Amino acid sequence: MAEAGLGTTDDAYASFSEEEQEIEGELSNRMWNQYVQRYPDADEYPNQYENWWVDGPWEFDFDVTVDHSETISVKANREGNCDIGEIEVTKTPFELALYYDYNKAAEHDYFVAVLDADGELMGFGHQGGSTDEHPITGHDVSEVTVYVCDYMEYMDELKGYYYSSDYEEKAKEKTFKQLLDERCVYSEKVSF
């Protein structure tokens, strides 16, 4: 990147011209191609770089009682205000799961983010398919806000605001919640 005269910080990337974005894309493609040449089986699943095995034989036996008494589901976007379709938000004692049509989200280039009752971004456990799972440890999930954002804008600008080293200082002027409220495609509060 530096050899091509491109900055390597998030701020520099956010201000790339179309030509600079094309150069960065070409560099990324070249890097990926070199990686695949060096590690040809890395593009396969499973592979030795991302997956590990412990040979068995393994035999497990344990009793489990499933308790759904503390599982609560609430529907969001029931009126179809956003092209993503209905979003089911399910809270368990361990996680918050969002079920929605992932294909519609991808088709419209949407990203779904969730803030807890304190306006803090909830981290991801599993994401993709038809479910996004968010661990609830350390979060007040009595009420959450589901945000549907433009995917590129969220990845390139919005999440960088939250994860920036000076976020606490910036939050005195504008919190991440306020920024999402301004820039999201759709949002809805869900109370449990």
Image: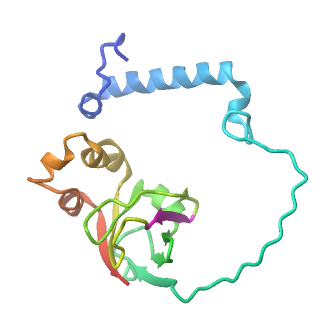
* 169 left or right of 129 in image: left
Residue at image coords 36%, 67%: 139
The quarter of the rendered structure image containing the N terminus is top left
Q: Quadrant of residue 14?
A: top left
Q: Where residue 121 sits: x, y (%)?
A: 33, 59
Q: Where residue 165 sits: x, y (%)?
A: 24, 39
Which residue occupies the extreme left position in the image?
A: 173
Vertical arrangement, residue 68 with respect to residue 135, above or below: below
Q: Quadrant of residue 82?
A: bottom left
Which residue occupies the extreme right position in the image?
A: 57
Residue at image coords 58%, 60%: 129
**Magenta residues (range):** 130-136
Which residue occupies the extreme bottom position in the image?
A: 69
Q: Quadrant of residue 18?
A: top left
Q: Where residue 177 sits: x, y (%)?
A: 22, 61
Vertical arrangement, residue 6 with respect to residue 53, above or below: above
* 23 left or right of 62 in image: left
Colour scheme of the picture? rainbow
* 94 left or right of 40 in image: left
Residue at image coords 22%, 56%: 176
Query: What type of secondary structure mainly makes up the magenta span?
Result: strand
Identify which residue, 78 or 135, lies in the foreground.
Answer: 135
Vertical arrangement, residue 48 with respect to residue 1, above or below: below
Q: Where residue 24 sits: x, y (%)?
A: 39, 24
The quarter of the rendered structure image containing the C terminus is bottom left
Q: Specify whether residue 153 is painted magenta.
A: no
Numbered label tally: 0
